[in-house]
Amino acid sequence: MSPPRFTESLEELRAVLAASAALAPAVDAAGEAILASLRSGGKLLTCGNGGSAADALHLAEELVGRYRIDRRALPAICLNADVTALTCIANDYGYNAIFSRQVEALGRSGDVLVGFSTSGNSPNVLAAFAAARARGVITILLSGKDGGQARTQCDHALVVPSATTARIQEVHTLVLHQWLEAIDSADWSDV
């Protein structure tokens, strides 16, 4: 079996992007929740595993640093970035608690947690959502396939209509860039 050619991957991505247009209202609503939290003094928490961990880190670093324009630094913490916390928590509580324990420590009512899970079934993301809900933290899922268990355990579910992990993650990048565009477009002078 030969690997797919680049043009085949492009065609698959085009089809997934076209189908993802239906997500626009959900993308905008989740982005508005993030913006409202940041404007009212809240912070953004992100998490994911593997490639989704890279997406979670990408979103957080663009807020603390900058995306396209110079604006004030915004509070964002990627829960999979601190290897000492991850290994301590995994050692003492198990891998499924690596994000939820940090949400317990850092999450406050009005904050937002964005969990990236292409399947929607990552036990540690599910546990993070449960911990977030207990603290009044708004939860946003970026997923694919059927959204898994997390689809019904969050405030905003953005489920990319694809079963291909690479295509799901490519759309996740587009979504997080859209949120960053909206954040960059906001007036931060009065905050």
Image (cartoon, rainbow, N blue to C red):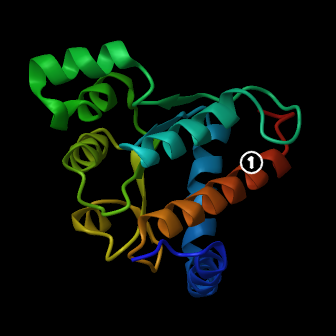
Q: Position of residue 131 (x, y in %)?
A: 24, 40
Residue at (60%, 32%) from the top-left corner?
41
Q: Quadrant of the N terminus?
A: bottom left
Residue at (53%, 36%) from the top-left corner?
57
Task: Look at mark 1 in the image and give the residue it sits on.
Answer: 183
* Residue 114 is at least partly visible in this image: no
Instruction: Give neighbour class at mark 1: few <14, some 14-19, many 20+ (Cα, 10 Å).
Output: many
Where residue 120 sits, quadrant-wise, is bottom left
Q: From the viewer's perspective, is residue 167 above or below residue 189?
A: below
Q: Position of residue 82 (x, y in %)?
A: 41, 19
Name the residue type under label 1. Answer: Ile
Q: Position of residue 69 (x, y in %)?
A: 88, 38
Q: Say how many tags the image has.
A: 1
Q: From the viewer's perspective, is residue 141 above or below residue 138?
A: below
Residue at (40%, 38%) from the top-left corner?
109
Assign a secondary structure to mark 1: helix
Q: Quadrant of the C terminus?
A: top right
Nearest the camera: 80 or 30? 80
Residue at (29%, 48%) from the top-left corner?
129
Q: Position of residue 145 (x, y in %)?
A: 35, 74
**Drawn side of residue 123 relative to residue 128, left or right:** left
